[in-house]
Image: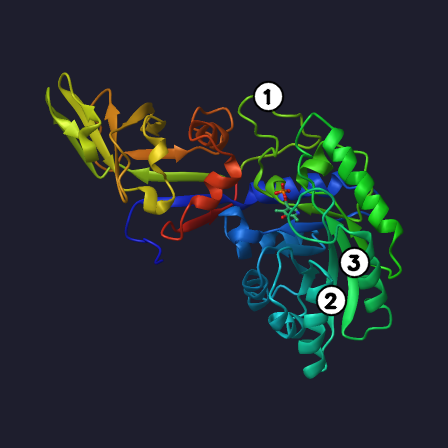
Amino acid sequence: MIAGIHRPAVVRVNLGAIKQNIDNEMKHLRPGQKLFAVVKANGYGHGAVPVAKVAEKAGASGFCVAILDEGLELRKADIVKPILVLGVVSPEYAPIAAVNDISLTVPNLKWLKQAEKYLKKENLQLKIHLGIDSGMGRIGFSEDDEFIAANKFLEKNDSFFVEGMFAHFASADSSDDSYFKKQVAKFKHMQDLLTVHPKWIHVANTAASIFDKDIHSDLVRFGIGIYGLNPSSNPDSPDLKADIALKPALSFVSELTHVKTIHKGDGVGYGSTFVADHDTIIGTVPVGYADGWIRKFQGFKVKVGDQYCPIVGRVCMDQFMVEMPEKMPVGTKVVLISDNPNDPNNIKAAADYVDTIHYEVACLLSDRLPREYYEK
Ligand SMILES: *Cc1c(COP(=O)(O)O)cnc(C)c1O
């Protein structure tokens, strides 16, 4: 999708905040612990390469991405530090990863055997991290026999270099520790079965690190914290208190492109879900669900000039309308998402409004929205 540079709708990213968040986490690391910056999904919508460059300067030891192409994007941008793909890459692409010095996650023994064939053909060695399913139920080894066999397979196997072993927590952002502890125990059990020697054993995501869980992890896979957001974003309970200061980096701004007064009986938007019962001032904003600003935002209040105004009528594909208390000119600034956590249109409030988490709101912002970088 092409970015709309001739339209006043921009995702603004404060790289100063990104730097501060990483600096704060770097200081919070335990002795010897390293930080891998998670920049998957285009840096949670913030832009993978600009974020990775800041993280590199701030002392990140490596990067995590979700898919191979995201790793290749970083390599193309001259990022030379380790890159780990967290998802499953088809074994036939193992040589591409090896050539680009990108580490892959091993989901099971079958994958290893298939990847070996492709690597042998080209006489390549691949860096791997053994994925462990300690209770996330997603990817990785969970059965003893298979894991023991995989270790055997890897002993003295030149096609692979075992760089890591890791698992992912399902509930490190919850105040209820019981499932978390179960996952820790399962991981320890799998670790006891190792006969190969990974350099990095890692389990910590942002939550496990900043809620100070009692675990060992050689790396922190620091994701949402980079972007200044608290991972515990359950709308039904207050956020857990983070050990480090977090400063949101993202804001989403646009402008009014049209302003008018409608009269009693006039409708707004598809299906006329809003009908005026008196003279009403309506402003139009050139952003819609094709930008990731989904229809569920109907009723949410965005800031127009210095007033919070509700979205009225259905959000269209490319535009939405707001009801305004007074006439404001075309070109008036509209803040859809504020980077100030105290503003009512902060990203967590926006996520709560549409029944999701801020991770999803940020990731949904589409490529049609240019990202504008600044430092503050
Ligand atoms: C996305 C992801 C992370 C980062 O999680 P945050 O909550 O954003 O810190 C870490 N590890 C794995 C395996 C992931 O998929």
41 relative position to 149: left or right: left
Q: Mark 3 against mark 2, which lies toward the viewer?
A: 3
Q: Amino acid at mark 2?
A: Lys
- Identify the element where label 2 is drawn: strand
Q: Give the labeled residue for mark 3.
A: 146
Q: Residue visible at 68% across and 71% down?
A: 115
Q: Give the labeled residue for mark 1.
A: 238
CA–CA distance in space, label 3 to label 1: 41 Å
Quadrant containing ligand 1 reads top right
Q: From what the image shows, is residue 283 above or below residue 132? A: above
- Counting residues from the start of the chain, the first of labels 2 and 1 encountered is 2
Q: Amino acid at mark 3?
A: Glu
- From where the camera sits, is residue 122 visible? no
- Identify the element where label 3 is drawn: helix
The answer to whether the residue bearing label 3 lies less than 8 angstroms from the nearest atom of ligand 1 is: no
The answer to whether the residue bearing label 2 lies less than 8 angstroms from the nearest atom of ligand 1 is: no
CA–CA distance in space, label 3 to label 2: 20 Å
Q: Give the labeled residue for mark 2.
A: 127
In percent of width and height, residue 164 lies at 77, 57
- Counting residues from the start of the chain, the first of labels 3 and 2 encountered is 2
The one of 326 and 311 positioned closer to us in this rendering: 311
294 relative position to 176: left or right: left
In percent of width and height, residue 1 lies at 36, 58
